[in-house]
Image (cartoon, rainbow, N blue to C red):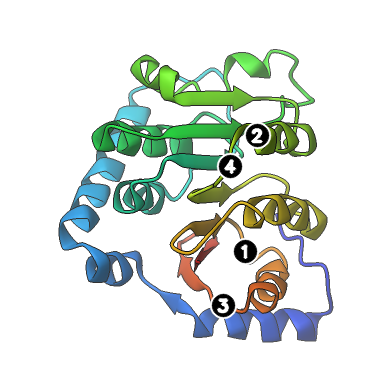
Amino acid sequence: MHRFERSFQDERRYREWLSSHETTFDRWADGLSRDLCREAMAFEKDLYAFAQTQDFPVHMGGNAYVRLLYFLARYLQPETVVETGVSIGYSSQAILSALAMNGKGQLYSSELQYLHDNQSHKYIGLLVSPEFRDRWTLLTEGDRINLAQIAQRVGRINLFHYDSDKSISGRVFACNIALERMSKGDVLVLDDVNDNDHLLSLSNQIGRAPTVFTTKYKSIGLFMM
């Protein structure tokens, strides 16, 4: 859904700015680790193929940019990963699979039960393999409550993936919590950055230019601290 929150001229200038920072996943990841780039691409292909064989009882949002999240979780070797927005669990399965390959790391996930379905808690993270559950903490009371609780449990956040409330206020709230716990070498990833110009404000706030990946359906912004 289109939710740009400023004028058409602002939107046009913002999209031009996004385009100026665009690259492809292959080019970017291959420059960091060719082997992990190929591993991430293969993992994404296998996960999507597996998901196609599953008869999910409900539709709960779109797929995450699996190859990027898997690559980052392998490349960074993080101790702590935090994500918002789980849905069926593409992003969670990608991150947890990478952490398992690393042999270390914990994932904290924030989600909100879908208001139109009081049974939605049964489907959140349905794609996540049972053997990964010991690395995974899933909270389902919404970002305002969940992230505050996660912040009390973790010291440093090595990788933060935002894919929940698409409003500017929701993004600002979550990113501020994450940034307070991030240091040099940590990575912040935001989905659907084409919805509004929060990414530009965030770039100015932290004094860094983003790397932007654009797929058929959305744009993803990444900051490496």
Looking at the image, residue 222 lies above or below residue 71: below
Whether tag 1 and tag 4 are in contact, CB under 8 A, the answer is: no
Where residue 146 appears, as percent x and y from the top left, is: 71, 32
Spatial separation of the CA atoms under disc 1 and disc 4: 27 Å
| Amino acid found under the numbered disc labelled 1 | Val
Where residue 46 appears, as percent x and y from the top left, is: 25, 37
Whether tag 1 and tag 2 are in contact, CB under 8 A, the answer is: no
Q: Is residue 46 visible?
A: yes
Marks 3, 1: nearer the viewer: 3
Residue carrying label 3: 208
| Label 1 element class | loop
Camera-nearest residue between 15 and 221: 221
Marks 3, 4: nearer the viewer: 4
| Label 2 element class | helix
Camera-nearest residue between 171 and 124: 171
Residue 155 circle label? 4
For label 2, count other residues whose C-alpha is less than 10 Å away and answer few (under 14), some (14-19) or many (20+): some
| Amino acid found under the numbered disc labelled 3 | Arg
Spatial separation of the CA atoms under disc 3 and disc 1: 16 Å
| Label 4 element class | loop
| Amino acid found under the numbered disc labelled 2 | Ile
Residue carrying label 2: 150
Spatial separation of the CA atoms under disc 2 and disc 3: 26 Å
Where residue 49 appears, as percent x and y from the top left, is: 29, 34
Spatial separation of the CA atoms under disc 1 and disc 2: 24 Å
Task: Indicate which disc, 1 or 4, sits on the residue closer to the N terminus.
Answer: 4
Residue 197 location, quadrant: bottom right
Apparent side of residue 105 relative to residue 136 in the rendered image (left or right) = left
Quarter of the image where the N terminus is located: bottom right
Residue carrying label 1: 193
Looking at the image, residue 188 lies above or below residue 108: below
Residue drawn at (70%, 38%) of the image: 147
